[in-house]
Image: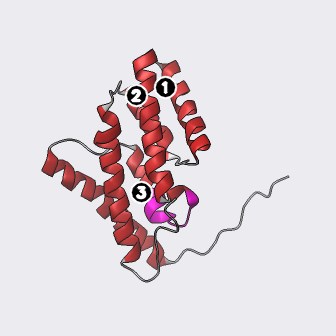
Amino acid sequence: MAPLRGPQPPMSLRYAIWSFLSATFGILAIYGITALVGYPLLIGSFGASAVLLFGATDSPLAQPRNLIGGHLVSAAVAVIIVALFGSTPLSIAVGVGLAIFVMNLTHTTHPPGGATALIGIQGAVGPEFILLPVLAGTMILLVMAIFMNNVVYHRSYPNHWL
């Protein structure tokens, strides 16, 4: 039987505060660029990506390959599912499962990708969804993660690119 509580590694106040500030600036950067280009670039799954990029920077799921690949694979799955089956409860459920399947096969698992697929299918998106908002928003978050996680001495990101 598994223990009720697992080990809790120590969390410094400094790390938690920097996670808060970094995530805040990361999401604000997406809003700022949205205002500049006049096209909405923020989707809900980016909030979950911010948790990984700014709160769990060492996680394999937070590394650039997973961040970019997971969102792009999931967005592509959403576009294909919508084109073939439309936006129904069944297509949404199958789309999330298929996004996980493809992320697993391509070694790009990024849990927020499941939400990207769900959002895309629910919104009955077209191919443009892959570039705007998914790729653009993901790249903004990546640039912010690289900057915010390397500007202080107690963090380093990424651990690897591929």
Q: Which residue is mark 3?
A: 50
Q: CA distance from mark 3 to mark 2?
A: 24 Å
Q: Residue at x 35, y 43 (%)?
A: 134
Q: Nearer the viewer, mark 2 or mark 1?
A: 2
Q: Is residue 97 left or right of residue 55?
A: right
Residue 24 sits in quarter: bottom left
Q: Relative to residue 87, is residue 127 depicted above or below? A: below
Task: Say few, some or many: other residues with alpha carbon within 10 Å of mark 2 (under 14 / 14 to 19 / 20 or more).
Answer: many
Instruction: Provide residue 70's location: percent of width, then percent of height.
Output: 48, 45
Residue type, mark 3 in image: Ala
Tell me, yes or no, whether the two marked residues, 3 and 2, touch with CB atoms within 8 Å: no
Spatial CA span between label 1 and label 3: 23 Å
Amino acid at circle 2: Val
At which x and y percent is residue 105? 61, 41
Spatial separation of the CA atoms under disc 2 and disc 1:
11 Å
Q: Which residue is identified by label 1?
A: 92
Which circle, 3 or 2, is nearer the viewer?
Answer: 2
- The answer to whether 141 appears left or right of 13 in the picture is left
Q: Amino acid at mark 1?
A: Ile
User: Which residue appears at 33% of the width and 30% of the height?
Assistant: 127
**Image x and y of residue 53, in percent:** 45, 61
Look at the numbered disc 3 and give the secondary structure of its residue: helix
Q: Are marks 1 and 3 in contact (CB under 8 Å)?
A: no
* x and y percentages locating residue 72 in the rendered image: 42, 42
Per the rendering, the mark at residue 76 is none
Quick one: label 3 or label 2, which is nearer the N terminus?
A: 3
Residue 117, by quadrant, is top left
Colour scheme employed for the rendering of this structure: secondary structure
Q: Residue at x 36, y 51 (%)?
A: 138
Main secondary structure type of the part rendered in magenta: helix
Magenta part of the chain: 50-60
